Image (cartoon, grey):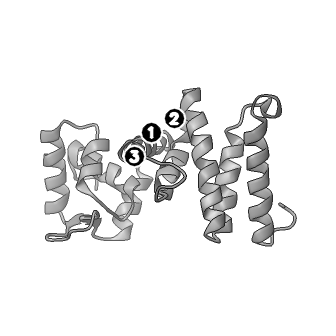
């Protein structure tokens, strides 16, 4: 990885935050490079065999890492601040592409990326949105019998509540505590419940 150009490293680091496989569209939208430099960086990592492109695949994931260790090395080369910023960019982009409501197909990866980018969120409005998304995700996970995930989402939502949440956000506070209790009980973590 140390022999790559700045463009190649940038493409690889951003790709590492997307997971083992991903779509080019999202990678080019979250990368901060101009398109010509992005293409140069992508070509470089493809030529060096670090990423592999699936030709003729109709699925969204048309690129993948040649080996898990390549993704891990690229990801570990990011500082915690860089990881947070990239995950936030990914989450925002995914959220903009998908209208989320109670009836839509739920996309847990959107909430996961936004949660991983939580440290980079500065606006209260966006924190409030993420709190609501975590509450929805906790409910959806519980309804799918994924109680560990339901508990995780509810706890993350709880951490987003303001200090005096019982006075200013009573219903959200109650809903989050109920989700924590129900998910913990259903996964037989009675101490947490």
Query: Label 3 crowding class (10 Å Cα cut-off): few <14, some 14-19, many 20+?
Result: many
Pinpoint residue 182: horizontal percent, then vertical percent.
Answer: 78, 62
Q: Please state if 11 lies on the left or on the right of 107 as rendered.
A: left
Residue 174 lies in quadrant: top right
Residue 91 lies in quadrant: top left
Query: Up-down: is 69 above or below 92?
Result: below
Whether label 3 touches label 1, CB < 8 Å: no
Query: Up-down: is 119 above or below 176?
Result: above
> Label 1 belongs to which residue?
85
Of callouts 2 and 1, which one flags the residue occurring earlier in the amino acid sequence?
1
Of callouts 3 and 1, which one flags the residue occurring earlier in the amino acid sequence?
1
Pinpoint residue 82: horizontal percent, then vertical percent.
Answer: 44, 41
Measure the alpha-carbon separation of dots 3 and 1: 9 Å
Residue lying at 14% horizontally and 47% vertically, measured from the top left: 39
Q: Residue furthest right?
A: 191
Residue lying at 82% horizontally and 29% vertically, measured from the top left: 167
Q: Which mark is residue 90?
A: 3
Residue lying at 75% horizontally and 48% vertically, measured from the top left: 175
Measure the alpha-carbon separation of dots 2 and 3: 12 Å
Q: Please state if 38 lies on the left or on the right of 190 as rendered.
A: left
Residue closest to the eye, 116 or 176: 176
Pinpoint residue 183: horizontal percent, then vertical percent.
Answer: 74, 63
> Label 2 belongs to which residue?
120
């Amino acid at each position: 990885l140390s022999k790559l150009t700045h463009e190649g490293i940038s493409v690889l680091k951003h790709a590492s935050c997307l997971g083992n496989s991903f779509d080019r569209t999202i990678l080019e939208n979250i990368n901060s490079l101009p398109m010509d430099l992005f293409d140069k960086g992508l070509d470089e990592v493809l030529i060096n065999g670090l990423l592999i492109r699936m030709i003729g695949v109709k699925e969204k994931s048309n690129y993948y890492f040649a080996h898990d260790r390549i993704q891990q090395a690229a990801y570990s080369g990011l500082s915690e601040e860089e990881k947070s910023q990239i995950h936030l960019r990914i989450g925002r982009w995914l959220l903009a592409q998908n209208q989320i409501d109670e009836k839509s197909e739920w996309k847990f990866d959107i909430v996961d990326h936004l949660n991983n980018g939580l440290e980079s969120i500065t606006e209260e409005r966006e924190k409030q949105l993420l709190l609501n998304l975590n509450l929805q995700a906790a409910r959806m996970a519980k309804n799918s019998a994924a109680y560990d995930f339901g508990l995780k989402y509810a706890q993350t939502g709880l951490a987003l509540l303001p200090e005096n949440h019982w006075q200013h956000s009573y219903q959200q506070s109650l809903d989050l505590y109920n989700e924590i209790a129900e998910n913990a009980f259903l996964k037989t973590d009675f101490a947490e419940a």
